[in-house]
Amino acid sequence: MSVNLRDYIASVPDFPEKGVTFRDISPLMADGVAYAQATDEIAAYAKKLGVEMIVGPEARGFIVGCPVAYKMGIGFAPARKKGKLPRPTVSASYGLEYGQSTLYLHQDAIKPGQRVLVTDDLLATGGTIAATIELVEALGGIVVGTAFLIELKDLKGRDKIKNYDMLALMDF
């Protein structure tokens, strides 16, 4: 699926031309066919890598990773903010443009040696993805790849995950 994000958004009826935030993937998600094609492509990539578990940071990772995991018949584990987490966790911090944040993952979410795909809606600066990879590896998982709907190339998130196989369906 090689979709140019600008062209795709321009094709959405009544989508505002000014003030479009390219971090907003709702135009893609609003089109069930495009979204299904995107998750099918990520699932095919994950199968090729022999993925056994999918992990995604926060809600954005969930909207990509959960449907892919469902299509493959495997588990999905969210790396998330602290909130109310019912079981013991591991944590990893990452920098934001306005400070620090931390992600948490249940200690029993990943089995040692398990082959993991890290997913998210987009790759921007790479902070949440790097923290998610750190969590998976702290639990003994093997990150065999990363997958994104959109990569914002100017933000250089790829630099933080350069040692990992990567699939980005669209770039801007």
Image (tube, rainbow, N blue to C red):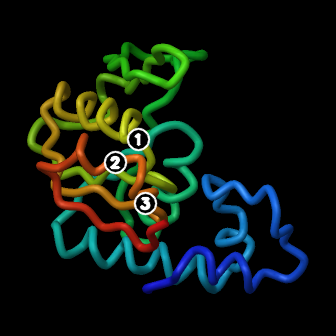
**Secondary element at image label 3:** strand
Q: Image quarter for residue 47? A: bottom left
For image coordinates 22% across by 57% down, the residue present is: 145
Rate crowding at label 3 as few (under 14), some (14 to 19) or many (20 or more) other CA atoms within 10 Å.
Answer: many
Nearer the N terminus, badge 1 or badge 3?
1
Q: Quick check: 163 above or below 80?
A: below
Along the viewing direction, whichever of 58 and 54 lies nearer the viewer: 58
Q: Measured from the top left, where is residue 102 in percent x and y?
A: 44, 18
Please state if 124 lies on the left or on the right of 8 as rendered: left
Between the residue at mark 1 and the residue at mark 3, the CA separation in whole angstroms equals: 10 Å
Residue 161: x and y in percent read 22, 46
Dots 1 and 3: beta carbons under 8 Å?
Answer: no
Badge 2, how many Cα within 10 Å: few under 14, some, many 20+? some
**In the image: residue 130, left or right of residue 69:** left
Q: How far across and down, in percent of the image, does residue 29 sit?
A: 67, 69
Residues marked 2 and 1 touching at CB (< 8 Å): yes
Tell me the quarter of the picture where residue 52 sits: bottom left
Marks 2 and 3 close (CB-CB < 8 Å): no
Question: Distance of mark 2 from mark 1, alpha carbons?
Answer: 6 Å
Crowding at dot 1, Cα within 10 Å, few <14 / some 14-19 / many 20+, comes out as: many
Q: Which residue is mark 3?
A: 151
**Residue annotated with mark 1:** 125
For the point 23% across and 45% down, which residue is it? 159
Residue at 70% from the left image edge and 76% from the top image edge: 9
Name the amino acid type tagged 2: Lys
Q: Secondary structure at mark 2?
A: loop
User: Which numbered mark, 2 or 3, is in the foreground of this view?
Assistant: 2
Sequence-first disc among 2 and 1: 1
Q: Is residue 131 above or below residue 64?
A: above
Which residue is found at the position 38% from the left and 26% from the top? 105
